[in-house]
Amino acid sequence: MLSSTLSIAMREMPSHAFTIAGRIVRQLIRDRRTVAMIVVVPLVVMSLIGLSFPEEGVLDFIAPALLATLALFFSFLLTGISFLRERSQGTMERLMASPLSRLDIVVGYLFGFFIFALTQTLIIVLFTIYVLGVNYYGDLWQIFIFQIVVITGAVNLGIFISTFARNEFQMVQFIPLIIIPQVFLCGVIWPVEQMPDYLQWLSAVLPLTYAVDGLRDIMLLGRNLIDVGSELVVLIGFAAVTSILAAITLRRGAAS
Amino acid sequence: MALDRVSFNYNGIKAVDELSLEVPGGISFGLLGPNGAGKTTLIRLMVGLLRPRTGSIQILGKAPSRKTAHLIGYMPQLHSLYSELSVWHNVDFFARIYGMRDKHRREQQIEEVIRLVDLWPRRKDPVLNLSGGMKQRVSLACAIVHKPPLLFLDEPTVGLDPELRVIFWDYFTALTQQGATLIISSHTMDDAAHCHRLAFMRQGKVIAQGSPDELRQATGRPEATLEDAFLYFIHRDEGNA
């Protein structure tokens, strides 16, 4: 029993994940405009928020939330569209007919997007500290580890949701369904406690709530990863559930 | 490569119906038939993208799985390439996922196949900027870079001009001479004439198989073309049904 489980685990080792990650990075870098948007858009958003709120301290409050929101948004959407293309251009067929495992593909996508989303996180953190003059506690590496968990869930969600979209237009339609409600309900802009009870209940089942809480605790209160353990556990659970959904739906499109 | 009474349904429609087939090694084997005859479904079954509902498939003595995947090259009907990436990087990606770890050998082989399909001067261009025929050639290069003994080509000559079609058949002949087995689907009799052996397909079944000459002679008329032969077998099949 154990040996067969082990042999399955060995066989499923994502040995080609780096190959796929490398390809994703190369594809995105080739697209200069996308790279520019990834860097510029969060800075514009941060600056607008910083300038539009007259009272001090609002940006301190919003910036950590925006780190999580942008990581979720960006990883979800770009993974979704990349995967959709993988299906519509037929490369998925080639991947599924090759010796690659599903794990190779999912882990490859994760590694690829870690690089981009963490670069984005770094840019936002540096910008808010040095340009907008916000003070943070908490270590950068703890922020990064927390973000990796958020991104893992987002990438898997993107793979899963892309199964339900036939083209890029349909994929974009999932933004108002999946991202925007979370921005409003998860305490990004105003505290969850100020919302009606039933909306607070709803926010309790949305992953971004925990991402925002955790990052605020780390960055504003200087807490560490163990202090935000309960948020991390929820987010790891979300990543686990979405990774199962992603693995189940991965083949679809290649074999239909 | 052998198939034994293989069936596959799409939503209750029989795409492949109790089909048996045997393909000897080192030849080019043509799957000929009109659109919707089940050629693509059959190829997808053979490369392991679909599992047969009934019957069994053997690829070089084994059922198709991830373990046999590296023995197979697959060129799908669509170009199936990463359009932002260059010719080189597309071929390189597929070389890597087929386990070509040794950098020196991999690069040698990539160069060899890109030269084979005559795209060496364009190797740095993104696939996006290439013509349809060139994309088709890149697609072929990606399918053969790991030198698979068994190659599945789903309508590889569709949309090619006559000159390029001849060039493609030169590539295919070169590959069989190196010992590879090619399974090629097509709906044009022009391709059929180039194959060592043929299977005529219709409504998910093989209605006749043999060498092009054997199939022509079966009509009983010495001057018959392959098209005549195909029609002859369709009529015979309808007579039986």
Image (cartoon, rainbow, N blue to C red):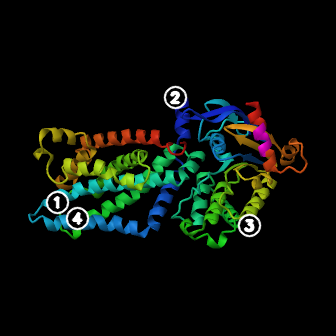
Residue A204 in the image: state x and y as whole percent.
21, 40
Residue A33 in the image: state x and y as whole percent.
40, 69
User: Is label 3 on the same chain as label 2?
Assistant: no
> On what subunit does the disc labeled 4 rest?
A
Query: How much space separates mark 3 and mark 2, taking CA atoms?
Result: 58 Å
Q: Which mark is residue B163?
A: 3
Query: How much space separates mark 1 and mark 3, taking CA atoms?
Result: 66 Å
Q: Which mark is residue A60?
A: 1
Q: Type of residue at label 1?
A: Asp
Residue B145 in the image: state x and y as whole percent.
67, 57
* Tally of numbered tags: 4
- Residue denoted by label 2: A2
Question: In the visual, does A34 lie left or right of A44?
Answer: right
Marks 1 and 2: in contact by CB < 8 Å? Answer: no
Residue B69 in the image: state x and y as whole percent.
64, 44
Q: Which is in the foreground here, disc 1 or disc 3?
A: 3
Query: How much space separates mark 2 and mark 1, taking CA atoms?
Result: 50 Å
Q: Type of residue at label 3?
A: Glu
**In this picture, which residue range is highlighted in magenta?**
B230-235
Q: Residue at x 56, y 39 (%)?
A: A11
- Residue denoted by label 4: A46
